[in-house]
Amino acid sequence: MTEFEDRPADWLSYDEALERILRSASSLPVEEIPLSSALGRVLARPVISPLTLPRHDNSAMDGYAVRGEDVEGSSEAAPTPLTVVGISRPGSGWTGRVARGQAVRIMTGGPVPTGADGVVRVEDTDRERETGRVMILDDRDRGRHVRPRGEDVEKGEQVLPAGTPVGSGTVALLAALGIPRIEVRRTPRIAVLTTGDELIDATESERVWSGDALADSNGPALVAGLRGAGCEPLSLGIARDDEGALKQAILAGMEADALITVGGASMGEGDLVKRVLDRMGFRLDFWRIRARPGTPFGFGMLPRPGEKPLPVFGLPGNPVSAFVTFQVLVRPFALLLGGHSRIGRPVVYARAGTRLSSPSRFRQFLRVQLEREEDGVWVTKRTGPQGSGLVSSLGRADGLAVIREGEEAVEQGEAVEVILLGEGPGWHGDPGPHR
């Protein structure tokens, strides 16, 4: 068996690395759940409307349903009297027919009765000062304020495709259609394992502040990122730099849908993660990519008896490298695993506030803030030094400015692609380079 230290780097392009990762993702099983608990889940089947909305022509105003020819020319100086023959409320419309000289009092959403072709708003009437008769004081609403049957949804229409994330607006639509339960994809469970003798849990504040050890920022960041992608994170904690401890931690994550390891991805003597994985039968797909930060990123499959192999992502230990590779390589996989039809983050094109340079062989992801100029154009501002160990740049970043392979720089004032970093699996825009 070739030891990890002797394995040549693949140096895949970012696009090829992402393509290989996404090819390995298969949607998770389908389950049926109540609409009340569906927020953040992903539709596994298209939703076909069981009814037409609105069910009837209905009123967009509180007022009086009338025949347009009866109220033409009405004004305060020459009001038109009409006989009020009924009332139409939402869910209990008036079933007769409006004849010449008649009107029906109607509430917003009430079915427009046969014979009427418009609704005069109540403000343009005398509000039935005389019982059973209304005076029309303006004809501006003649032929208006009728919402036609089926204007919103037709029965049998596909209203939502599979892969749609369920948001509050989705819930509103499904509830209006009388759909109490929906089929969704099971939530992906993704395990996170950080490694290193130098790390302690961030909750051990006194030790962190005294300088006894380094706080693990990667684990909490990845757990938060997975939650933002609609996943169920399984934190495996921090494993010591010991082959036995690493193996036990990896075994604890074998029931997940994927495993993320952080650290131990390079070629130093203490980088044991890949060595331990190799001895567990790990099949490496690739190691090292032409992207910065995050060059030492790796991906492969770990066999599981009687099950599909476990996808394993090997992220670099530097906080910026781990964060960026998660965002641009792991997050799209997690969304695809959960059944999302869109897996890319929103992208905007901004004006470079300063010169942004990059080695031409690599795709560079630079942390930037965005400020809107007086002309309405977004302009990038660096978050500070771009070193892969400088975690402050992550807390300040609005997005990742992308410099593609073959580009040595984006000059000040030129357009640059920026991947926005807002959280939430349902936040979509132009998929940009991720799809």
Image: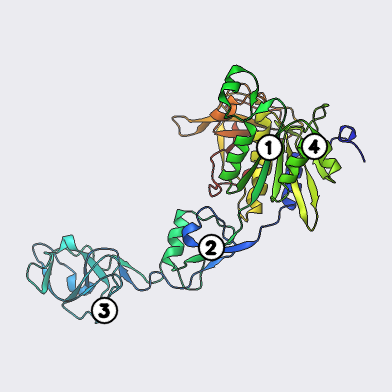
| Amino acid at the residue labelled 3 | Gly
| Residue receiving disc 4 | 244
| Residue receiving disc 1 | 325
Determine the CA span between mark 3 and mark 2: 44 Å
Foreground mark, 1 or 4? 4
Point 72% across, 50% down: residue = 22
| Residue receiving disc 2 | 33
Q: Secondary structure at mark 4?
A: helix
| Residue receiving disc 3 | 115
> Dot 4, how many residues are within 10 Å of its Cα: few (below 14), some (14-19), or many (20+)?
few
Sequence-first tag of 3 and 4: 3
Foreground mark, 4 or 2? 4
Q: Secondary structure at mark 2?
A: strand
Report x, y in % for residue 199. Answer: 67, 27
| Amino acid at the residue labelled 4 | Gly
| Amino acid at the residue labelled 1 | Thr
Looking at the image, residue 25 lies above or below residue 326 = below
Q: Count the marks: how many?
A: 4
Foreground mark, 1 or 3? 1
